[in-house]
Amino acid sequence: MYRGQLKLAVLKTLSEGSQSGYSLMAQLGKLTGKKPSAGSLYPILDELKKNGAVKSLPKKRKIIYSITQAGKLKFAKEMNFKDQLFQDMVHNCRMFDHLMDVKMAPFMEEVIARVKKGERPFEEIEPEMHKMKMVLLHMLNKGQISPNKAALKRIIAHCIKEMEDLT
């Protein structure tokens, strides 16, 4: 995650509620798939504190971080630059396609264009899509994709056929 993106993610996450640095790292990891290191997160929190965007309060053995009104304004202002984030995402999809010789960019570009317009294209089926991704990731981590390749292909082909029948 780029430093500028991490800063925005910290402000966005803190706008949803105060939390410790450790829980902030864990939540960002859960949301983005890559947990930021303490060496990345704490300098950003220090910078945001220095700029008045975040405040911290000691609570037992933890420090709880909260976004300030100035932080909320900073986040809103920074989000005006989200067009650059969308452009970077499209660029990264195209680069991934080129380097890995896969053809996901057209699909991802369509999804990104819709999200940019404020749509959530798969909102109604997000829980099911998330569950499927988590099951596949679990299988990948357990080395169960290759041994079950034929069955997985059959299941996916069946799903595709049923979805095509809906159109």
Image (cartoon, helix red, strand yellow):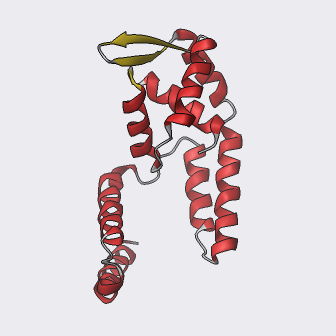
Location of residue 2 by image quarter: top right
The quadrant of the picture occupied by the C terminus is bottom left
Residue under the image location 30 percent in, 86 percent down: 147
The quadrant of the picture occupied by the N terminus is top right
Residue under the image location 52 percent in, 26 percent down: 11
Query: Quick check: 59 above or below 106?
Result: above
Residue found farthest to the bottom:
150
Q: Is residue 136 visible?
A: yes
Location of residue 78 by image quarter: top right
Where is residue 39? Give x, y as percent: 55, 35
Q: Nearer the viewer, residue 38 or 32?
A: 38
Residue under the image location 42 percent in, 31 percent down: 24
Q: Nearer the viewer, residue 19 or 160?
A: 19
Q: Is residue 154 visible?
A: no
Residue under the image location 62 percent in, 59 percent down: 109
Q: How many marks?
A: 0
Where is residue 153? Give x, y as percent: 35, 84
Q: Nearer the viewer, residue 139 or 89?
A: 139
Where is residue 120? Give x, y as percent: 46, 47
Residue 8 relative to residue 136: left or right: right
Where is residue 34? Give x, y as percent: 48, 49
Location of residue 111 by image quarter: bottom right
Query: Quick check: 158 above or below 81?
Result: below
Residue 25 relative to residue 42: left or right: left
Query: Quick check: 153 above or below 6?
Result: below
